Image (cartoon, grey):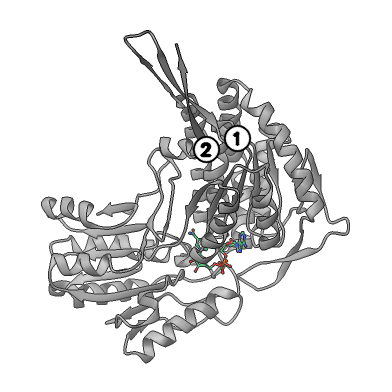
Amino acid sequence: MTQTYDTELKLFINGSWRTGEGRDEHAVLNPATGDTVAALPLATPADLDEALAASAKGFQEWRATDVEARGAILHKVASLIRERTEAIATLLTLEQGKPLVEARGEVASSAALFDYYAEEAKRAYGRVLVRPTGQRSIVIKQPVGPTATFTPWNFPVYLMTKKLAAALAAGCSVIAKPPEETPGCTSALMRCLIDAGVPANVAQLVYGVPDMVSRHLIGSPTIRKISFTGSIPVGKHLMRLAADGAKRITMELGGHAPVLIFDDCDLEKTLDMVVPQKFRNAGQVCVSPTRFYVQRGIYDRFVEGFAARTRQLVVGNGMDADTKMGPLANSRRPDAIDALVEDARTKGARVLTGGVRGNQGFFYQPTVLADVPLDANVMSNEPFGPVALMRPFDTFDEAIEQANRLPYGLAAFGFTENGRQANMLGDALESGMVGINSFAISVPDAPFGGVKESGFGSEGGPEGLDSYLVTKAIHQA
Ligand code: NAD
């Protein structure tokens, strides 16, 4: 298996792949070692203007393409992604750090989503209302227009896919700005699109200084829709930019997922599920289970079982076959997590395991904090890293109050064998997704998105397609 970072990084604008040619560059690092592996060219304002002009043309071409033909191309994208899994997953692990097996899973999910939207594209249904007078009201759905997408580094391939697959299915052209930290795997994804037959000016790829690129694209009258996945502060900033042009937006922002563990749960089975989920992608997951509220009767056993399993995790380079958790994705993350852990420790949390950095690259040991006081910063600020927080509770109502106390609401989880309690959890938890005895909450055919400050709009399912469509009512006498 090749362990070398073997790709030339380029922009894809107006039908051609563009290399350095005097552009500023960004150093791409391998987070397992901290070494620079490649130089990424950054788009200039002139590049973005060219992309915008091409996107306007591409939209007219793509919206006029028969939906069956669009669907066939998207199925072909899925096939190419599957054929190229090993190459894409290797780039992903080398620049993001996650274990190769997780990278392969991410690539497989991306292929599945292209297949889903290839079919869902055919279901952008309208309706006809017939009046006794003979007048008809015809409601149709049309693609919203050229779209700009901004995606983060934690699931660079899958999150870019969520936007591109739905936008292309709806008939929109797209300018994608994936993260500068992980450009190899996202370029490889864009090559699948182009090689499958997506017309050159329909899908374009730019990297750059994020603030310059987002201001330029969102400020252009060409762009009619913005879709962003990332942090809440950046999301709010982009919403303000979009407001100037009254543009449609989808915002998938952070969360701080509560996990309610009731004393009637299957304890060993629950522990076997939650520990790998907590440390998947080193906890850099917007729906990562983070605040564990455990009913007092099983609190000590749960906390000890969790810490014991955590100590057994093999932390290492994502390219090594036995690695269960890789490094964090960039140098900002260990600093941020260290500060949160130190704050919690100072305020009285017990560090049962972890709480230290690795000695090379951007590693941070999987960390379990028990009895974390509510005033610890980490109880209110998403750690976005390998940190599990434990607190006991007594009653159902108290657990719900704790779970819902933050201004976020992306995902929430509950573990109980009591069916009535499970139903009550589904109703009471304030979040876009609720997993009960399950973490399988990101699937192609169901909506994924947050409430409260976690954002609005959904990706996945018919709702994801709808977010790239506008509704028009035609009244005909
Ligand atoms: P950040 O806020 O600097 O950036 C978050 C993402 O937004 C990155 O992908 C970045 O490239 C992009 N970005 C930043 N400024 C931008 C701008 N002006 N215009 C367009 N895009 C811009 O934070 P970070 O250090 O990269 O990540 C840390 C925090 O981000 C985490 O704590 C987590 O809360 C959040 N995050 C959330 C998700 C998610 O899936 N919801 C993914 C990654 C990061």
Closer to the camera, 73 or 104? 73
Image coords of residue 142 (percent x, y): 53, 28
Is 183 on the left or on the right of 312, as rendered?
right
Residue 151 seen by the camera: yes
Q: Can residue 98 be seen in this view?
A: no
Q: Where is residue 295 in the image (x, y as percent from the top left)?
A: 16, 70
Of callouts 1 and 2, which one flags the residue occurring earlier in the amino acid sequence?
Answer: 1
Beta carbon of the mark 2 residue lies under 8 A of ligand 1 = no
**Along the line of sight, which residue is nearer the eye, 422 or 110?**
422
Report helix, strand or loop for mark 1: loop
How crowded pointer 1 is (Cα within 10 Å; few <14, some 14-19, many 20+) is rated as many
Residue in the picture at 73% in, 32% down: 57
Q: Are marks 1 and 2 in contact (CB under 8 Å)?
A: yes
- Label 2: how many residues lie within 10 Å, few (<14), some (14-19) or many (20+)? many
Left or right placement of residue 391 versus residue 113 in this view: left
| Figure quadrant, ligand 1 | bottom right
Q: What element carries label 2?
A: loop
Numbered mark located on residue 468 in the image: 2
In the depicted structure, whether residue 368 falls above or below residue 317:
below
Q: Position of residue 117 (x, y in %)?
A: 50, 33
**Quadrant where the N terminus is found in the figure:** bottom right
How far apart are the two marked residues, 1 and 2, measured between alpha carbons?
A: 7 Å
Looking at the rendering, which quadrant does residue 263 occupy? bottom left
Residue ranking furthest to the right: 22
Q: Whole-percent x and y of residue 28?
A: 70, 65
Classify 454 as above or below 127. Answer: below
Q: In the rendered image of this protein, does residue 211 appear above or below residue 383? A: above
The residue that disc 1 covers is: 172
Residue at figure coordinates x 66%, y 62% from the top left: 211
